[in-house]
Amino acid sequence: MLIAFASAKGSPGVTTTVNVLGDVWPADVMVADLDPAGGDLALRHRDPQGEPLDPERGLLSLAAAARRGVAQSELEYHVQRIDGGLDIVAGVARPEQVTGIGPVWPALAHSLRGAGVDVLADCGRVTPGTPVMPVMAAADAVVFVVRPSVESYAHLRERLHWLSDPLQIGQRGSIPVGVVVVTSPSDSSAARDLDRLLQYAGLQVSVLGRIAEDPKAVRALTGQASKRLDRSLLVRSARQVATSVRSMASGRSAAAAGR
């Protein structure tokens, strides 16, 4: 399965959300950092030996290989394992590097869908004209990450309206779209309020749950602090969200396989 994660505006925590979901995912998984503005995941982590990741292996090398078609056995070359054991496709260092990928995005999406594992793709901030649209259109589910505020919800609503046609949101057989709210662990109303807003706007989009704001756990996730993560609010909330996201995407994946 291929699941695309994105934001409507700002930096609500897409990379951290994808990172922690990858750590608790209930199946074999790989994270692909496709943010056109430049990826952060490889900068936050080192390999299991404590060494920096190879800057030559990742999105750019995979895109070059995708021009000729990437066999599943070849995909391993473009994937690196980070501390903690998560496999990733490292993103670009600078936004201008994305221009070289150009028309290869559909082939890139095809390569990721054929990875043989679930792929969580960090697509960064999505705006009209975004180059990652072929990846989102090929995904088994699209998940937006948002923080609870009036302006964030307004931008999310407008972005979802804009995506209604390309993703055919709400139509039979369309790509399911969900939203995850990054909020305080004590905030029990954000997800409910957002669900009401989306329904009122006529958007058939599922609110999948909350990722708990837990700064200490986030620092530990990236190796900047020592903290047991298993019992952290961040990881506990991520486990629940991972189940919801995978369940939503599995229905689309099964339907596509049955065609």
Image (cartoon, helix red, strand yellow):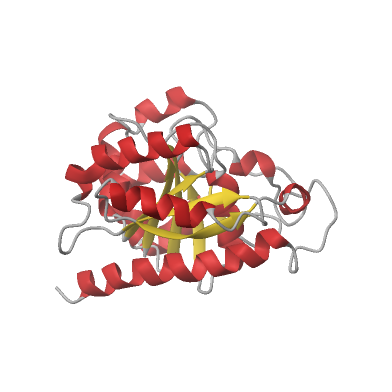
The residue closer to the viewer here, 240 or 104, is 240
Q: Residue at x 51, y 26 (%)?
A: 94
Residue 129: quarter of image = top left
Answer whether residue 117 is visible to the viewer in this image.
no
Q: Image check: 70 left or right of 151?
A: left
Q: Image check: 64 left or right of 236?
A: left
User: Residue 21: x percent and y percent?
Assistant: 56, 60
- Numbered disc total: 0
User: Residue 46: x percent and y percent?
Assistant: 71, 47
Answer whether residue 74 is visible to the viewer in this image.
yes
The residue closer to the viewer here, 4 or 81, is 4
User: Residue 132: x percent and y percent?
Assistant: 34, 39
Q: Image check: 83 left or right of 256?
A: right
- Name of the residue lying farthest toward the right: 226
Q: Residue at x 33, y 60 (%)?
A: 113
Vertical position of residue 256 compared to residue 132: above or below: below
The residue closer to the viewer here, 191 or 137, is 191
Q: Image check: 128 left or right of 231?
A: left
Q: Residue at x 27, y 50 (%)?
A: 203
- Quadrant assignment for the N terminus: bottom left
- Quadrant assignment for the C terminus: bottom left
Residue 240: quarter of image = bottom right
User: Residue 123: x percent and y percent?
Assistant: 42, 42
Q: Residue at x 46, y 57 (%)?
A: 192
